[in-house]
Image (cartoon, rainbow, N blue to C red):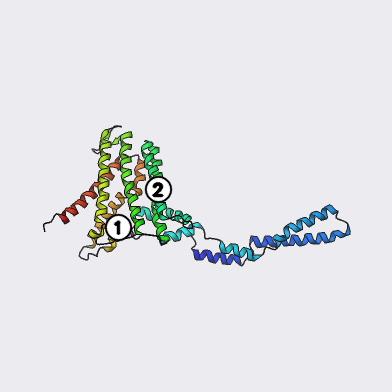
Amino acid sequence: MRSPFEYREASTKGMNKPSGLASTSAQVGSASAGLAQAGASSSDGRLGPELRCLLRFIDMAIRPVAQIGPAVENRVVAVASPPMFVTAARIYRETRKKHDQLFNTYAMRPIAALVVAAVAPSRVTPNQLTLVNLGIFIIAVTMLVGLPSWRGGLAAIAVLEVSYCFDCADGMLARYKRLASKAGHLFDFFTDELKAVLLVAALAVRGWLMGGLGVDARIWSAHDARFLFGGLVGVVVVASAISLTNFVRRPELSGRETTVEAFYEASVSAQPAKAHTPASAARAASLIATFFRWLNHYPSHIWLWAVAGRMDAYFWIYLAMNSAYLARGWLGLLLRFGRGG
């Protein structure tokens, strides 16, 4: 793929060669001169008056075209914009995150960069893309409930991934156009957590409609009320996890002001290096943390569960992940605030 510099160089070289517009202009000029000569030679009476009139009319029509020269073409080349793929590649490079999911790095953000390249010249704002992302997600979870079948699940998750593409694009647009703000970051976080609540509720209702794998690893029949009970527990767990996250991120507790970067990046960069930790142990801990981050990041793999037709199993895994996060967070709070004075 050419860089923007290579594109400009190619455009400059092209200006030194006769282009289609210049060649056509020259040909039209020759034709106009030929018509003028034909009209002048018609005075010998060999051409009738009707033909002479037609030749003059054609000459008058094409003479302005013959006057279009290379200067006009140079202006056309000057205003030509780089191909969208080149712009998208530049946006991708300039808006990458340090510690991103592999799915984001190699799959979703390259696609989101094309979205940003398309909307960047317009007045579309990052917050508007966040709202679009939320609206599409609501359509996706509605499809999860309204289409209780394998194909319906695939279609719903496809729409969900489109929503996530816009979720990536809003932050990329903010960084690319230097529009990132604390308010925008918090609004994006709010919509992300709202989507988590909607997802767990939709998966529970879908399990109730279709039946499937229960928490006891047995198949539950359709309209088994235990799916709805699990959904109620899931909504409470996810909502509690959201409250816990907002609490521990408060500057009064974390010692850090709200930033416009992803929180996990800020927390990683703020941690001091632990020289006493063996390299092998540190690497193992990092791999485990990366795996659980990937498992909790549902856009990275929820499509695999949809293809396998096991959205019921994913519901329980997602519930277990959020329960584990909530338990770990509460353990930290108990250790911090439960000690004696």
Q: Earlier in the sequence, mark 1 or mark 2?
A: 2
The residue singled out by tag 2 in the image is 163
From the viewer's side, name the closer residue of 56 and 42. 56
Question: Disc 1 marks which amino acid?
Answer: Tyr
Q: Is residue 321 visible?
A: no
* Residue at 55% over, 65% down: 10
Position of the C terminus, as image quadrant, is bottom left
- Residue lying at 87% horizontally and 60% vertically, measured from the top left: 43
**Extreme residue toward the left, this view:** 340
- Amino acid at pointer 2: Ser
125 vs 211, nearest the viewer:
125
Q: Which residue is mark 1?
A: 264
Q: In x, y percent, where is residue 295?
A: 30, 49
Describe residue 194's horizontal placement relative to residue 15 as left or right.
Answer: left
Q: Position of residue 274 (x, y in %)?
A: 22, 64
Residue 338 location (% of width, % of height): 14, 54
Q: Residue furthest right?
A: 45
Dot 2 crowding, Cα within 10 Å, few <14, some 14–19, many 20+: many
Q: CA distance from mark 1 to mark 2?
A: 22 Å
